[in-house]
Image (cartoon, rainbow, N blue to C red):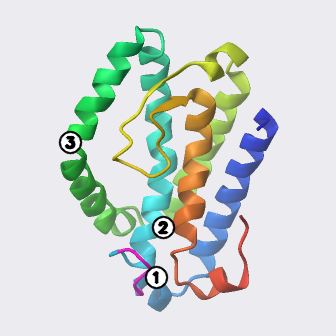
């Protein structure tokens, strides 16, 4: 995958997110999703959260990638040991995220975080993008045992597209961007 492809896929998800949030009715947002315990509203926040997470993961990868491989391996193992509490926090955090932020702020935050990630990706050296670390594979199906910075930049859109298929909004059945 090329740098321009990663930048474009993030932009596509950002634009799609805006469309989903702006066109959904209040009743649709309160409906359950397909395959999760969240409502559409809560799942949309969770989809945004994937991009927010990457903003922090970049710093972690930059730091741990420069250390001996065993350091990130042990770090990932420690995080894997905390998989159950992570899933509880991840679930509960998304329950109120959309309600706390509101839809306008969710859209603005998605715009901001994607622009930040795209800007950061443009500035990364090829060498930095090839560095990586071990990840807690129990935390997310899109986490691999070892992920490069390329993989980390690609992760939020994989996460987004996966969860987008679980939304039960009327506009989702009419349009699938992935």
Q: Residue at x 40, y 84 (%)?
A: 32
Q: Earlier in the sequence, mark 1 or mark 2?
A: 1
Q: Where is residue 25 in the image (x, y as percent from the top left)?
A: 53, 87
Q: What stretch is highlighted in magenta?
A: 31-36
Residue 90: quarter of image: bottom left
Q: Label 1 to label 3, Cα distance in Å? A: 31 Å
Q: Which residue is drawn at 44% across and 42% down?
A: 53
Asked if the residue at tag 3 contacts the one at tag 1, i.e. Cβ–Cβ closer than 8 Å, the answer is no
- Mark 3 is surrounded, within 10 Å at the Cα level, by few (under 14), some (14 to 19) or many (20 or more) other residues, namely some
Q: Name the residue under label 2.
A: 44
Residue 22: quarter of image: bottom right
The circle drawn on residue 82 is 3
Please tell me which residue lies in front, 66 or 16: 66
Q: In this view, does 32 lie to the left or right of 21?
A: left
The circle drawn on residue 174 is none
Position of 113 relative to 96 (above/below): above
Asked if the residue at tag 2 contacts the one at tag 1, i.e. Cβ–Cβ closer than 8 Å, the answer is yes
Q: Mark 1 points at which residue?
A: 29
């Amino acid at each position: 995958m090329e740098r321009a492809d990663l930048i474009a896929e993030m932009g596509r998800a950002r634009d799609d997110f805006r469309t989903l949030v702006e066109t959904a009715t209040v009743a649709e947002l309160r409906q359950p999703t397909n395959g999760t315990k969240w409502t559409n509203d809560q799942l949309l926040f969770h989809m945004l959260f994937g991009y927010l997470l990457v903003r922090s993961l970049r710093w972690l990868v930059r730091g741990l990638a420069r250390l001996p491989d065993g350091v990130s391996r042990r770090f990932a193992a420690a995080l894997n040991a905390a998989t159950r509490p992570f899933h509880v926090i991840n679930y509960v955090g998304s329950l109120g995220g959309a309600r706390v932020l509101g839809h306008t702020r969710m859209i603005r935050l998605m715009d901001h975080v994607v622009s930040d990630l795209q800007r950061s990706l443009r500035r990364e050296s090829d060498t930095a993008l090839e560095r990586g670390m071990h990840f807690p594979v129990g935390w997310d199906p899109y986490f691999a045992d070892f992920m490069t910075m390329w993989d980390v930049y690609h992760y939020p859109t994989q996460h987004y597209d996966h969860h987008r298929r679980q939304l039960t909004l009327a506009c989702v059945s009419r349009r699938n961007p992935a």
